[in-house]
Amino acid sequence: MHSYLVRTAVALGAAAAMLSVAIPAQAQDSPPRRRGIVEVDQLANPRWLLGITAMLARPTGEFREFVDWGGGLGIYATYHFDEGRHIGLRLDGSHLVYGHERFSAPLSTTIPRIGVDVTTSNFITNFGIGPQINFARGPVRPYVYGTVGFSYFATVSSVSGDDDVVEFASDTNFDDVTGAVTFGGGLLLQFNGGNHPVSLDLAVQSTHNGEATYLRRGGITDLPDGTVLIRPIESDANLVNFRLGIAIGL
């Protein structure tokens, strides 16, 4: 798996580097003009970049044997140190749901006429910090990044009324925390100029969580005596995230 991560990082870096060479070379052949998205001379380069992305996650390796696709949201902030906005520090967080169950049941044996919905979710919350490198200035900006942090694996059950989406009780059935290393890269496609430019963000991220203990969908069984049987899985828990979102300069 370590070799896989290295190959991923090298490939992302090579692709971004080629794009960074091609884009400036094209700009030198002609004066500033409209290049598909926004006038080059109208571009702004704020030091802060705030992004929010939708994520589609594909488990890899051992994790793929137990868990299928997942989805969630990611948010990040990048501060650029240099005037050219090439080198920055990225804070990255995400919340990914990879399993979900829901069923209806009576509130209790003594109050059978009132039904409740019991929902169980399996999720991973990740946080990391690390460098980001942007390879070009202009409306199309390739970038790569890497972070070091942690991932929190948890399975939570909650209860709400049949006619009410508000939860009135919840409990964490199982959880675990692991260290996490991520490598990612993508493209920022800028739509407008001004002090707060808005860009479409397309990215791919590889997350290496190492070995974790977690529950998957169906990992909890309700027994007739009122107790529950929990069957945790211990394996590598690595995955690849495909991210699509919006970034705003601040």
Image (cartoon, rainbow, N blue to C red):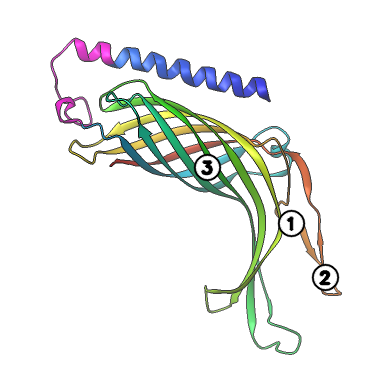
**Marked residue nearer the N-terminal end (3 or 1):** 3
The kind of residue on which mark 3 rests is Leu
* Label placed on residue 218: 1
* Label placed on residue 6: none
The kind of residue on which mark 2 rests is Thr
Task: Out of 34 and 40, give the one closest to the viewer.
Answer: 40
**Crowding at mark 3 (Cα within 10 Å: few <14, some 14-19, many 20+):** some
Which residue is found at the position 23% from the left and 41% from the top?
196
* Left or right of residue 97, residue 31 in this image: left
**Marked residue nearer the N-terminal end (2 or 1):** 1
| Image location (x, y in percent) of residue 85 | 31, 27
Identify the secondary structure beneath mark 1: loop
Q: Find residue 138 and report its image quarter.
A: top left
Task: Out of 11 and 77, give the one closest to the viewer.
Answer: 77
Check the picture and name the quadrant holding the C terminus.
top left
State yes or no: residue 29 in magenta: yes
Q: Is residue 27 above or below residue 201?
A: above
Q: Find residue 180 and report its image quarter.
A: top right
What stretch of residues is rendered in magenta?
A: 24-43
Residue that badge 2 annotates:
227
* Left or right of residue 2, residue 222 in this image: right
The CA span between labels 2 and 3 is: 34 Å
